[in-house]
Image (cartoon, helix red, strand yellow):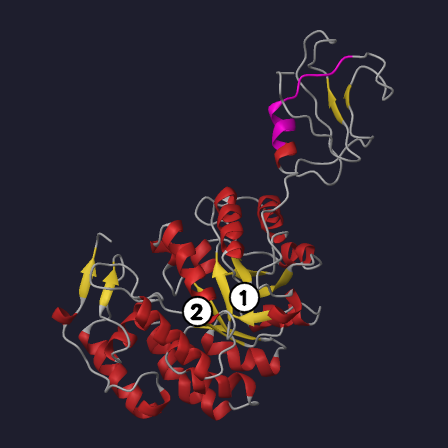
């Protein structure tokens, strides 16, 4: 062992190696207990022993520590988490939230965050009874942010609004180290809970997804987000059922339909619908706790009525044309366009997002008139806007 190298012994764990100095040749053969990410095998008192000798360690020699062992020791580190934060939230409080808005991130003309506009949007959510906001989610374009700006926006929301609304930070990533880093940072700046997606694009196995989630769950209340249309991979019920017993597991934002929702709620698992068009039925017919919503950016009062004031199929039907319009192109294109037309944000888009076409913008004006301008956020008249009114940024 190199001078000054730290030695860590894991409890009830034996590492068996045939590659240390007392053996001739052969590659290391590792055997881990069930608490390991790498499989199952022998148990002992945390010793390093030779596979050619018994657990009494009679060989008297310590084996070389392999890279696998070093990786395992790194997993033993505690999460960087403070429990002194004034916005620290018990997981049971997160489970009680019904209406959560995936809040929009507005921009200045140079592409930086428009914090006064963000504050106005958030205050409108609070005033209309919304209980939580997702900051830096897909709707909030976290995928277009660097982590410095992303964590700053979560922290800003916590400092300004954390005593009035639950701030849930989207800190998920397809790289586990990045998800761990962002989760630590998010809780350090005060978020009430974390939103985590399964690794996307570079997909992994079911065992890898499980290991990914287990790497972040210890840090604080966590909502798992299942949206195969974006990740390319469904988080199977088998995975959710395995992590549902963790003390920090709050529930699932589920986009796979109400049959999946019901299969979880019958087991006592908290579910928020991830589909605005299905959330009324999910809440009142299939046992969902509520919704993590996009349309509530525009009509938070009506969504409060829909989700918290009892079954209302008439209102649900009334909102369907707006919801269909919002998602005619991938989110958040419709929402960005709508908030620009309502005068709540500057018509600034970070590419690759571009506004809906003029025909669709004209349709939105009619939808607002049909539902009633008074039900939408803001107090300016809705406008069509011309193509030249929009600013598209490829550098920001």
Residue 191 appears in the picture as rendered: yes
Q: Quadrant of the N terminus?
A: top right
- Residue 65 has which mark? none
Q: In the image, is residue 227 above or below residue 34? A: below
Residue 137 appears in the picture as rendered: no
**Is residue 27 highlighted in magenta?**
no
Q: Sort mark 2 into few (<14), some (14-19) or many (20+) by Cα contacts within 10 Å.
A: few
Question: Considering the numbered disc 1 on the image, is that residue within a helix, a strand or a loop?
Answer: strand
Residue 97 horizontal/vertical position (percent): 58, 74
Please identify, in this view, whether the residue under mark 2 or under mark 1 is nearer the observer.
2
Q: In the image, is residue 68 above or below residue 299? A: above
Residue positioned 41% across, 85% down in the render: 319
| Count of numbered badges drawn on the protein | 2
User: What is the CA distance from the residue labelled 2 to the residue labelled 1?
Assistant: 25 Å
- Residue 160 has which mark? 2
Relative depth, front residue between 270 and 248: 248
Residue 46 horizontal/vertical position (percent): 78, 30
- Work out whether mark 2 precedes mark 1 in sequence or the reverse, and give the earlier one: 2
Image side of residue 196 versus residue 7, left or right: left
Relative depth, front residue between 151 and 24: 151
Q: Residue furthest top?
A: 24
Q: In the image, is residue 54 above or below residue 147? A: above
Residue positioned 64% across, 51% down in the render: 218
Residue 256 horizontal/vertical position (percent): 53, 66
Residue 50 horizontal/vertical position (percent): 77, 17
**Residue numbers of the magenta segment:** 61-71
Residue positioned 31% across, 70% down in the render: 116
Q: Sort mark 1 into few (<14), some (14-19) or many (20+) by Cα contacts within 10 Å.
A: many
Image side of residue 363 versus residue 150, left or right: left
Q: Which residue is mark 1?
A: 253
Question: Considering the numbered disc 2 on the image, is that residue within a helix, a strand or a loop?
Answer: helix
């Amino acid at each position: 062992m190199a001078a000054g190298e730290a030695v860590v012994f894991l409890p009830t764990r034996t590492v068996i190696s045939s590659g240390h100095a007392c053996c001739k040749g052969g590659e290391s053969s590792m055997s881990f207990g069930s608490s390991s990410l790498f499989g199952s095998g022998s148990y002992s008192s945390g010793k390093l022993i030779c596979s050619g000798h018994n657990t009494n360690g009679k060989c008297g020699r310590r084996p070389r520590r392999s890279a696998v062992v070093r990786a395992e020791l790194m997993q033993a580190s505690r999460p960087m988490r403070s429990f002194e934060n004034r916005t620290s939230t018990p997981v049971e409080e997160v489970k009680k939230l019904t209406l959560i808005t995936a809040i929009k991130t507005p921009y200045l003309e140079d592409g930086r965050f428009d914090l006064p506009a963000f504050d106005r949007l958030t205050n409108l959510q609070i005033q209309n009874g919304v209980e939580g906001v997702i900051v830096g989610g897909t709707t909030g374009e976290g995928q277009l942010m660097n982590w410095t700006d992303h964590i700053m926006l979560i922290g800003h929301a916590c400092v300004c609004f954390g005593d009035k609304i639950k701030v849930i930070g989207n800190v998920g990533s397809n790289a586990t180290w990045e998800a761990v880093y962002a989760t630590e940072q998010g809780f350090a700046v005060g978020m009430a809970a974390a939103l985590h997606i399964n690794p996307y694009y570079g997909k992994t196995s079911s065992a890898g997804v499980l290991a990914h989630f287990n790497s972040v769950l210890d840090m604080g209340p966590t909502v798992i987000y299942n949206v195969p249309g974006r990740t390319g991979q469904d988080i199977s019920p088998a995975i959710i059922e395995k992590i549902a017993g963790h003390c920090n597991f709050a529930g699932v934002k589920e986009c796979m339909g109400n049959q999946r929702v019901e299969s979880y709620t019958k087991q006592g698992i908290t579910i928020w619908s991830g589909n605005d068009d299905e959330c009324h039925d999910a809440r009142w017919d299939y046992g969902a706790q509520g919704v993590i919503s996009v349309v509530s950016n525009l009509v938070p009062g009506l969504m409060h009525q829909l989700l918290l004031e009892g079954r209302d199929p008439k209102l649900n039907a009334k909102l369907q044309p707006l919801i269909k319009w919002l998602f005619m192109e991938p989110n958040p294109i419709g929402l960005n366009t709508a908030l620009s037309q309502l005068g709540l944000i500057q018509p600034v888009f970070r590419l690759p997002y571009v506004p809906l076409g003029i025909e669709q913008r004209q349709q939105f004006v009619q939808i607002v008139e049909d539902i009633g301008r008074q039900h939408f956020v803001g107090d300016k008249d809705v406008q069509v806007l011309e193509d030249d009114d929009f600013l598209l940024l490829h550098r920001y």
